Image: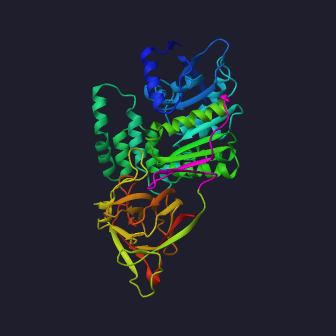
Amino acid sequence: MSTTQRGYVGALIDRLGHNYLGFPPERCSYTVTGVRIPITDGDEEFELVADVYKPVLPQDEQPAGTLLVRSPYGRGPMLSFGFARPYAARGYVVLAVSSRGTFGSGSTFDPWRNEEHDGHAVVDWMRKQDWYTGSFGTLGASYLGFVQWALLKNPPSDMVAAVIQCAPHHFSKQMWGTGSLALEVIEWGEHVAHQEDSGLSHFLDAFKSKKRMRAVLDRTPLAESVKTHFNGSAPWLDYVVDHPDVANLHYEQMNASEALERADIPILLISGWDDLFASQSLEQYARLSERKTNVAFTIGPWNHMQSGMDAKTGEQTFDWLQVHVAKRKTSTRKAPVQYFVTGAQEWREGPTWPPPTKHQTFYVHSESRLDSNVPASDEKSSSTFIFDPKTPTPTMGGNLLMGGGSANDTALASRPDVLTFTTKPLEDNLEICGPITVELSHSSDNPSVDLFVRISEVNAKGISHSVTDTYSRLPPRRDDQSITLQLRDCAHRFAKGSRVRFILAGASYPQYAMPLEKATHTIHHGRNGPSKILLPAVVI
């Protein structure tokens, strides 16, 4: 074990950066000590590599508490800057641990499947250390959030609080929940497989990664293309591309849904409307809230990468830990739920999510119209579009791992493989909060089809921007033409004079794996429908 003291340059970077991220002034410096944590898993024995951040405090002052952070992305400056250093400089002991098989830790990295076992082993070891303060909290985003849910499947008695940011609790559902594979997991696999590479060639290859992976995704069959590309470097992914059934026992360890039933500690959830895990964050809040646990929820105008760089999240995370781990202050949070309304560009707060709403219904009509009036029985009965895998409908914005968010999707609406239905200009502002429901009367000449459904806002200049969407692979055997889809929750104000646009397509590629056969989709309306959308309009 070696111990290092934070230097002058590190202190300067910390103070400038953490001030920008919403943290209060520092209270002390800190040291960093490398440690190894012995793990036994069946017949296998290995060590996890970790760093202990210890605050340098006056002799008569005790640490504020202990924080545990576990990650597969290493313990370098990028990770420690957000999840270790700001807390050590404000009096916390922080244990930062590398997941098995990553950055010096022993054994093999098998994403998502070993984090419950390893988490409890780390906690058992931590309790025996002389720097341990007797209780601990956890924090982290994305994979660093999933490991917290994994630990909470069987909550440690001395775990007193958690801050879980932009993170899933059910990763197999994230991959295969729509029925079509979320292809970003393959791009993530590429990143993880090469994240410990070094040198100039690796640096240059990183810039070509997107193009290189697109070539992998474009080849068919997809499973064989993925296996050939990784050539054994990501065996976990070889399994995933072959097994779409989320009930498969192999995926059981990727599912920490039990934690939503067992967690009984103060939990702060942070997400963004454009985060790829937003739907699971909302599910987490809903279940914990139903159980009357101490849960707070903040959801802002962020994608997956942006929330960690916003001062609001840094400030709220630190305050939550001060209240529930250090117990050095009382909560100043005015309401359990804080959410950002896009369009209005305003923050709202309230006792729960969603706020009171009532359905405002718009019906699909001929001639690409969306109207509050029920279609006449003699109106033209259907609208069609043709999906062709040779020219798949492209992904434009949405909830993505990298980038995404609200996008100018005007070009999407003009494609021949897309149907759009648009309202007249709104006579008043229309604010919606919650999930949007779509009820379709749908048929296709090929039973194996996908549906991409989106709501967008069209401004006075005719420019369309996405608000929310969903994706679903339809069951090949359907009893009737009725389909009900629920789009991702949103909080958005459609401005007076703008128009609501309803978009349908047969793919969103390369966000999701697409069908491989051509298909004609038919949306029925009039006497053979109706098809409609139900918007959750805020009750004022």
Q: Quadrant of residue 319?
A: top right
Q: Residue furthest bottom?
A: 378
Region rendered in magenta: 326-353
Q: Main secondary structure of the magenta part?
A: loop
In this rendering, would 462 be left or right of 74? left
Q: Is residue 228 visible?
A: yes
Instruction: Please tell me how many numbered marks the rendered image carries.
Output: 0
Q: Is 310 within the magenta?
A: no
Q: Position of residue 233 (x, y in %)?
A: 40, 35
Q: Nearer the viewer, residue 25 or 173?
A: 25
In this rendering, would 512 be left or right of 47? left
Q: Position of residue 510 (x, y in %)?
A: 35, 52
* Residue drawn at point x = 34 percent, y = 43 percent: 228
Q: Nearer the viewer, residue 332 or 492?
A: 332
In this rendering, would 279 be left or right of 290? left
Q: Position of residue 108 (x, y in %)?
A: 49, 31
In this rendering, would 507 be left or right of 32? left
How are the residues colored?
rainbow
Q: Position of residue 329 (x, y in %)?
A: 66, 31
The relative height of residue 132 versus residue 153 in the rendered view (above or below) is above
Quarter of the image with the C terminus is bottom right
Q: Is 336 within the magenta?
A: yes
The relative height of residue 443 versus residue 91 in the rendered view (above or below) is below
* Residue drawn at point x = 31 percent, y = 43 percent: 210
Q: Is residue 74 visible?
A: no
The relative height of residue 528 versus residue 200 in the rendered view (above or below) is below
Q: Quadrant of residue 495?
A: bottom left
* Residue drawn at point x = 64 percent, y = 28 percent: 123
